Amino acid sequence: MQAVADAATAGFHTFVVGVSTSKTTSNTVLNQLAQAGLEPRNDPNPLATRYFSADTKQEIVDSLKQITGVVASCSFDLGGPPPVPDNIAVKVGGQKAPQSDTDGWSYTSPDNSSLQIFGSWCDKVKASTDAVQIIFACKGDIIN
């Protein structure tokens, strides 16, 4: 327990995925680990488990989707500015997002070396297993 709490304090949060058991002590320990890891499962029911359940295949899938939604980021470091900052494309699930700081993408650094995806496009990033594509093109090239 202390190792999980120490890791969380150092900035390394822990998501706890476990199989529920009929032993109250086991569920208590899994809940305590989830709390110590600073990533408990959110549920308005105060009696609900705080760890992510993995009792069935579907629960494992659902738990991993919830965790992915929490850890998925809509911010991207480009490693440097694109050669032609006005000629890039950001694709989510194969669809080209518009350049918009409310529902699309926008540069977040003065030198255009990072960008963020906003609104419904960020929601798509968090809900999708598809990769986000950021495509740089040369001047005059058309990105489909």
Image (cartoon, rainbow, N blue to C red):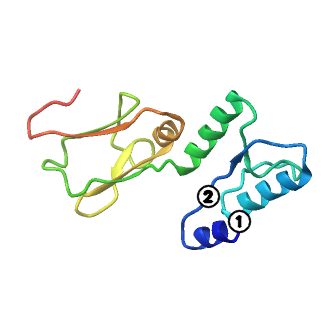
| Quadrant of the frame with the N terminus | bottom right
Q: Amino acid at mark 1?
A: Ala
Q: Whole-percent x and y of residue 121?
A: 46, 38
32 above or below 10?
Answer: above
Q: Looking at the rendering, which quadrant does residue 100 occupy?
A: top left
Q: Looking at the rendering, which quadrant does residue 96 occupy?
A: top left
Q: Whole-percent x and y of residue 72?
A: 50, 47
Comes first in the chain, label 2 or label 1:
2
Residue identified by numbered label 2: 14
> Which of the two residues, 56 or 105, is positioned nearer the viewer here?
56
> Which of the two residues, 103 or 116, is positioned nearer the viewer here?
116
Q: Whole-percent x and y of residue 40?
A: 71, 55
Q: How many marks?
A: 2
Q: Whole-percent x and y of residue 5?
A: 66, 70
Residue identified by numbered label 1: 36
Q: CA distance from mark 2 to mark 1?
A: 8 Å
Q: Name the element at disc 1.
A: helix
The answer to whether the residues at label 2 and label 1 have Cβ atoms under 8 Å apart is yes
Residue 36 placement, left or right of 136:
right
Mark 1, Cα crowd under 10 Å, few <14 / some 14-19 / many 20+, is many
Residue 139 placement, left or right of 79:
left
Who's the residue at 68% across and 52% down the image?
16
Who's the residue at 60% across and 68% down the image?
8
